[in-house]
Amino acid sequence: MFETLQDRFERVVTNLRGQGRLSDDNIQETLREVRLALLEADVALPVVRQLIEHVRDKALGETVTKSLTPGQVLVKIVNDELVSLMGQANEQLDLTTQPPAVVLMAGLQGSGKTTSVAKLARWLQDKQKKSVMVVSCDVYRPAAIEQLKTVAAEVGAECYPSRSDQNPIDIALGALDSARRHYKDVLIVDTAGRLHVDVAMMDEIKAIHAALKPIETLFVVDAMTGQDAANTAKAFDEALPLTGVILTKTDGDARGGAALSIRQITGKPIKFLGTGEKTTALEPFHPDRIASRILGMGDVVSLVEEVQARVDRDQAEKLVKKLKKGKDFDLADFKEQLEQMNRMGGIASLMDKLPGMGQIPDHVKNRANDREMGKLVAIINSMTPNERRFPAVIKGSRKRRIAAGSGTQVQDVNQLLKQFMQMQKMMKKMKGGGMTKMMRSMQGRLPPGFGGGLPPDGMPPGGFPM
């Protein structure tokens, strides 16, 4: 997400390097570039005008201190304005009511609403330790009820049964009664979607809203529709008292216009981002972290949180102890690292949060994807335990057998072995305090609160050894 803006802003900063002051001339040229970047990202025109005006007012006359370049001054100003534009801070779900707290989900057909219900249920169970029931009131699309049953089972949430011959309001009230009787903390209600905003749909969802009186009414919208997402959200907000927005399919949106437009146009906060197809691919929306990503500075805070939440610390500590004893990092360890990465949302999600990713060529980033990771795991699974422990024995005939067993080519096996050797060399450097030195050297790049608390073994929070 935000690749377009990242590329543009990187060029803006480069152009400003070496200048001692932000003058009227270079500010005008820079703001022209920023304006084009925002318009190319499909940010709504009124939002672009407001942001440009605020940046201009703050940037003109700013003196560059000895430790800063004009580019850094402007980036700081733009960063602050982006954060302000998107809402300053993360706005959490308000569940402070007599259980069950009802969360009503609204949106157009195809926006990812049903999948978002499952993702939110999982997030509430994992992060908030809530017991969750879900229900589908979409009686017009037969597959919708079955789809919710399937994804609810996947995330371990109870699904209230409904049928396509029932009245949506009766389904909703029945689910609310069941959630009360089963002492559920949260009831998430999936409503019917349409291909466009129409009167019948709005009347039905208004009636469901009036019957349930939900504490949260979330609008689910596809990020790839750009500023149309903001306009659709505004239309829904005029019919329903929305409390927030879930922006889906952000992993497929290189522009990011919706994220920058919605708050300003609707006045409603984005509460969550859908970042992929997996039920774990939902993350709270933090304006300051998103602004950091847009400006190519990554999102180390979210990355550390992912590490803390999803890494198997026991497994990581075993690897550290193994390396300290002088034992070699082998292919079984390499496979474990790949699987740890997958548990954190995949390599694409991690790369999106790393600083400086905009400077890596596209052809390199395209090679580092989750499908390639799956191929690497399949190749290792085709090896014998002895081959994983002693990779040096893997020669011609063994390579052909491994390739055939994993459905890959011999050159894929060669590529894996090459990557493994590079990883093994890096791990050898971590013996005898090398890990500690490496992590200490990174402290200056970590955000406040994460730089000074490394444990004696030098492991980052969560114990991730890569």
Image (cartoon, rainbow, N blue to C red):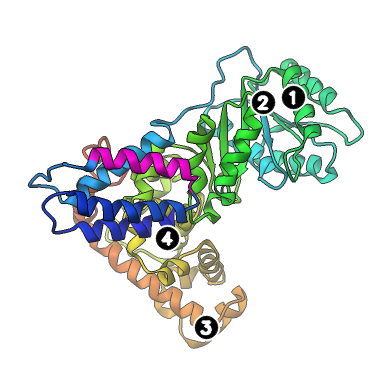
Q: Amino acid at mark 4?
A: Asp
Q: Which residue is under mark 3?
A: 410
> Relative to the observer, which residue lies in front, 373 or 37?
37
**Earlier-in-chain disc, 1 versus 3:** 1
Tag nearer the camera, 1 or 3: 1
Which is nearer the N-term, disc 1 or disc 2?
1
Name which residue lies at 28% across and 57% down.
Answer: 12
x and y percentages locating residue 88 in the rendered image = 38, 31
C-alpha span from label 1 to label 4: 54 Å
Q: Residue at x 75, y 28 (%)?
A: 205
Mark earlier in primary sequence (3, 4)? 4
Q: Return the mark for residue 333.
A: 4
Disc 1 and disc 2 in contact, CB within 8 angstroms: yes
Closer to the eye: label 3 or 2: 2
Q: In terms of sequence position, does the residue under pointer 1 or pointer 4 come before the other? A: 1
Assign a secondary structure to mark 3: helix
Kindly indicate whether the residue at mark 2 contacts the one at mark 4 (C-beta within 8 angstroms).
Answer: no
In space, the residues marked 1 and 3 are separated at their CA atoms by 60 Å
Q: What is the distance, in whole Å, between disc 4 and disc 2 at their CAs?
A: 52 Å
Circles 3 and 2 in contact, beta carbons < 8 Å: no
**Of the residues tagged 1 and 4, which is closer to the observer?**
1
Magenta stretch bounds: 43-58
Q: Are marks 3 and 4 in contact (CB under 8 Å)?
A: no
Within the image, what quadrant is residue 84 found in? top left
